[in-house]
Every structure is written in C-alpha cells, then in structure tokens.
C-alpha cells in the first residue's frame, strides 16, 4: 500500500499523536459494530435503545443478558493487527494517547497503555440503584449484595455523562496533538465525534481510516477507506522504511 510521502514524513516527525477508535477496529476480531444488525433476542432493537438507563430500568435482565453476550464475545475475541499496530505506534511516538469508544477491552489486551476508555469497559460492573462498593457484587446473578439492587455494566449509556477525567484527557490531548487519527468509527456519537474538530482547529493533521465514508471523510486531511487491520500495519511499515531511508541517506 502506498501512502503520500508528505504524510509518512509528518507521522515520522510527529511529537504528539492522538488516535480515536470505534467499533470498526474490532470488526476484524469478529465483533459486530454498533451499526451492524443486532442478533438474537435483541435484533429488534437499535443499540441506542438498549444502551440506556431507561431500557435497564424497564427490563434489567434483558439488558444484562445483552451485555453478557457481548462480554462473552469480547473475551473469546483476539486483538487484531489494527490493535497491535496502535500499540506499536504508542511505543514509537514521543507522546501518544489512544482514545477509544470501545468497551471490549481489546486495546489493553493488545498492549496499549497510554489509553482512555471514553465509554467505559464491559468487563467492569456498577451497582445501578446505589452505586455501592464493588466488593459485595454477585456478578453471577447480576445483583448487589449490599443493597439487593441490580448490577449494570460500567459503561456510559446514551444520555449519560462521560467520565470527566477520561473526557478531559481526551480533549486536552486532541487540542495539543500534531496528528489526530479517527479509526473505525462512524463519527456520529458525541462528544467523541467532536474531538477531531478540536484538533483540526489547532493545526493538527487529521487522518481517517474507515471502511465506509463518514461525516468526517470530506473534512479530514487524509481519508483511507478500507480495513484498519490492513491499513494501520502498512502505515507503520511505511514509517519504519522512511526511517531506514532517512538513516541511510541523511536529512532530506
Ligand atoms: C451525552 C457504551 C449528555 C455503551 C456508547 C450532539 C449532537 C447529537 C446528539 C448528541 C449530541 N450530544 C449528545 C448527543 C446524544 C448522544 C449521541 O451522540 N447520539 C448520537 C447517536 C446522535 N450522546 C450521548 O448520549 C453521550 N452522552 O451526551 O450526555 C449529557 C450532558 C449533560 C448531562 C447529561 C448527559 C453518551 C454517548 C456514549 C454512549 N455509549 N457505548 C455500549 O457500548 O453498550 S456509544 C457506542 O456507540 C460506542 O461506544 C460508540 O461510541 C458508538 C458507536 O459508534 P462507532 O464505534 O463509530 O461504531 P459504528 O458501528 O457506528 O461504526 C463503525 C464504523 O466502523 C463504521 O463506519 C464502519 O464503516 C467502520 N468499519 C467496520 N469494519 C471496519 C471499519 N473500519 C475500519 N476497519 C474495519 N475492518
């Protein structure tokens, strides 16, 4: 795969890189994206309808089972070449922050450390009614032993505020970065979908890598339509080779 040499040079020389990821980066690990049709009992529902406090209030078991299925699928899945490429990019860049909308935990399993989970993590739980301490959680039965209430996944539901520290870190990093990647996301869920604009307004290069066009495609400096598990490793290779050229032939 060929990349514009100006892009590879910018990436090689970048001091601060931010990468925003969405469900698309986990698609090649076999996990369905949010836009993909729901399966089984939940096929009649849009994720936005299930991932809400109202839906949980209405039928906790139904929503708990949906998350249990997604949790099981995430545990069975393996990080793919896209996740691994970002873990490598983290090691190369002087400053790097991975901002993920994914709750599947695959980035951490791929070795990413400098990361914020904007929408939480499906493998953690909270007490829905009283936010009781976690040591008394009966995960098996989805109950809080302290208050008898229901356990919910520690994710951000639609209509709920994002964790202030994670969002604060993401906004600061976006506003200070040289390069901002938007990877495997439909760029429609806010406030995550607004981060690229903050970076762009402060002079960053915005690069989109996504299978299908999004509202960002025509606004990004570079937009590569394709699979992140193929494009990201190729980009890392291009940077690595540029380094070799640079080392052997001296400054441009
Ligand atoms: C809030 C956790 C406010 C749960 C999630 C401004 C304008 C309009 C609406 C709003 C706005 N501000 C707020 C809103 C409302 C809402 C929102 O944005 N709605 C959207 C639908 C319009 N936002 C909220 O509710 C947020 N909270 O605003 O609170 C507030 C303020 C004050 C006081 C109280 C409250 C909370 C948003 C977070 C919700 N939680 N997840 C769970 O996972 O169960 S969001 C969830 O959906 C994901 O985390 C992710 O963020 C989003 C899905 O998006 P993507 O990840 O992009 O996935 P998608 O399937 O859409 O796209 C995948 C893409 O990958 C596709 O484009 C495809 O082409 C591509 N792809 C596929 N395969 C590949 C690939 N790309 C590369 N390689 C491949 N192989």
Image (spheres, grey):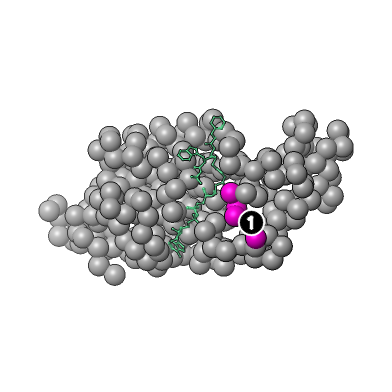
Q: Which residues are magenta?
A: 44-48
**Picture coordinates of residue 24 (x, y %)?**
48, 59
Q: Which residue is mark 1?
A: 45
> Which residue is found at the position 80% from the left and 41% from the top?
150
> Which residue is found at the position 46% from the left and 33% from the top?
169
**Picture coordinates of residue 82 (x, y %)?**
45, 61
Q: Quarter holding the N terminus?
A: bottom left
Indicate left or right for 152 with 189 as reference: right
> Which residue is found at the position 58% from the left and 41% from the top?
158
**Picture coordinates of residue 31 (x, y %)?**
58, 63
Residue 57 forms part of the magenta stretch:
no
- Tally the marks: 1
Q: Nearer the viewer, residue 88 or 185?
A: 185
Q: Answer few, some or many: residues within 10 Å of disc 1's Cα (few below 14, many 20 plus, some between 14 and 19).
A: few
Residue 47 forms part of the magenta stretch:
yes
Indicate left or right for 146 with 183 as reference: right
> Which residue is found at the position 37% from the left and 38% from the top?
174
**Picture coordinates of residue 72 (x, y %)?**
70, 60
């Amino acid at each position: 795969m060929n990349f514009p040499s100006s892009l590879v040079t910018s990436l090689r020389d970048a001091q601060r890189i931010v990468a925003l990821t969405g469900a698309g980066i986990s698609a090649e690990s076999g996990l369905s994206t949010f836009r993909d049709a729901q399966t089984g009992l939940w096929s009649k529902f849009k994720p936005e309808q299930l991932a809400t406090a109202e839906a949980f209030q209405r039928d906790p078991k139904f929503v708990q089972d949906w998350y249990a299925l997604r949790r099981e699928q995430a545990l069975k899945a393996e990080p793919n070449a896209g996740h691994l490429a970002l873990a490598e990019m983290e090691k190369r860049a002087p400053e790097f922050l991975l901002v993920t909308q994914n709750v599947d935990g695959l980035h951490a399993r791929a070795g990413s450390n400098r990361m914020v989970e904007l929408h939480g993590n499906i493998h953690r739980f909270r007490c829905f009614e009283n936010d009781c301490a976690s040591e008394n959680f009966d995960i098996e039965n989805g109950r809080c032993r302290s208050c008898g209430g229901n356990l919910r996944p520690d994710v951000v539901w639609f209509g709920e505020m994002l964790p202030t520290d994670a969002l604060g870190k993401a906004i600061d990093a976006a506003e200070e970065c040289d390069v901002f990647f938007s990877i495997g996301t439909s760029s429609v869920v806010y406030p995550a979908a607004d981060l690229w604009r903050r970076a762009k307004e402060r002079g960053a290069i915005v690069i989109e890598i996504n299978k299908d066009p999004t509202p960002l495609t025509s606004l990004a400096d570079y937009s590569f339509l394709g699979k992140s598990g193929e494009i990201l490793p190729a980009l890392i290779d291009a940077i690595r080779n540029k380094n070799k050229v640079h080392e052997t032939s001296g400054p441009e």
